[in-house]
Structure formats: C-alpha cells, structure tokens
Image (cartoon, rainbow, N blue to C red):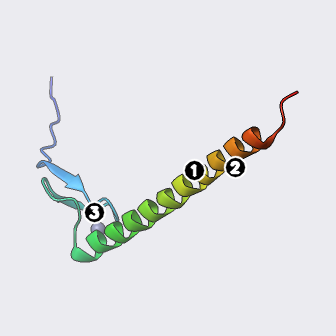
Amino acid sequence: MSQQKTLIPPHTHCKVCGKAIPVGKSYCSNECRESEVKSQQRAKRLSRIYTLFFIALMIIIILMTALTPRG
Ligand SMILES: [Zn+2]
C-alpha cells in the first residue's frame, strides 16, 4: 500500500488573478488589490442606484394607488 501524499504548503489564491499566495493575504499585489477595491466601489454605487430606483418605484406605486379613485 503506497499512498502518494503531495505536500502542498497552506496557501490561498489571489481574488483577482488567481495566483497562489500565502495564507492571510487576499491579493498577490497592490495592483490586484486596487482593482478589486475599484470594482467593489463600482458595485456599491450600482447597488445604491438600484436601491434609489426601487424606492422611487415604490413611491410611484403608492401615489398611483392613492390617486386612483376607489369605486
Ligand atoms: Zn493577483
């Protein structure tokens, strides 16, 4: 019985490019970190726009309901 054990030191992968990096780190370089931060900021802004759009839609629906005469 021979078990092949490949000893891979504990590591993780860069969130951006997927490079193997030491555990505890999230990115392989400052460039990758900055690009991730930028994309997160973009996503945050986009979700805020969606939230505002949803709120506006709710207000319109409420106004429409309030303005519609009830039979
Ligand atoms: Zn990277």
Q: Is residue 4 left or right of residue 38?
A: left
- Which is more N-terminal, label 3 or label 1? 3
Question: Residue at horizontal 11%, vertical 49%?
Answer: 9
Label 3, ligand 1: CB separation under 8 Å: yes
Q: Secondary structure at mark 1?
A: helix
Quote the CA–CA distance across marks 1 and 3.
Answer: 41 Å
**Among the 4 quarters of the image, the one containing residue 26:** bottom left
Q: Amino acid at mark 3?
A: Lys
Residue under numbered circle 2: 60
- Which is more N-terminal, label 2 or label 1? 1
Q: Amino acid at mark 2?
A: Ile
The quarter of the rendered structure image containing the C terminus is: top right
Residue 12 in the image: state x and y as whole percent.
21, 52
Q: Are marks 1 and 3 in contact (CB under 8 Å)?
A: no
Residue under numbered circle 3: 19
The quarter of the image that holds ligand 1 is bottom left
Quote the CA–CA distance across marks 3 and 2.
Answer: 48 Å
- Which is more N-terminal, label 2 or label 3? 3
The quarter of the rendered structure image containing the N terminus is: top left
Residue 10 in the image: state x and y as whole percent.
12, 48
The residue sitting at the right extreme is 71
Residue under numbered circle 1: 55
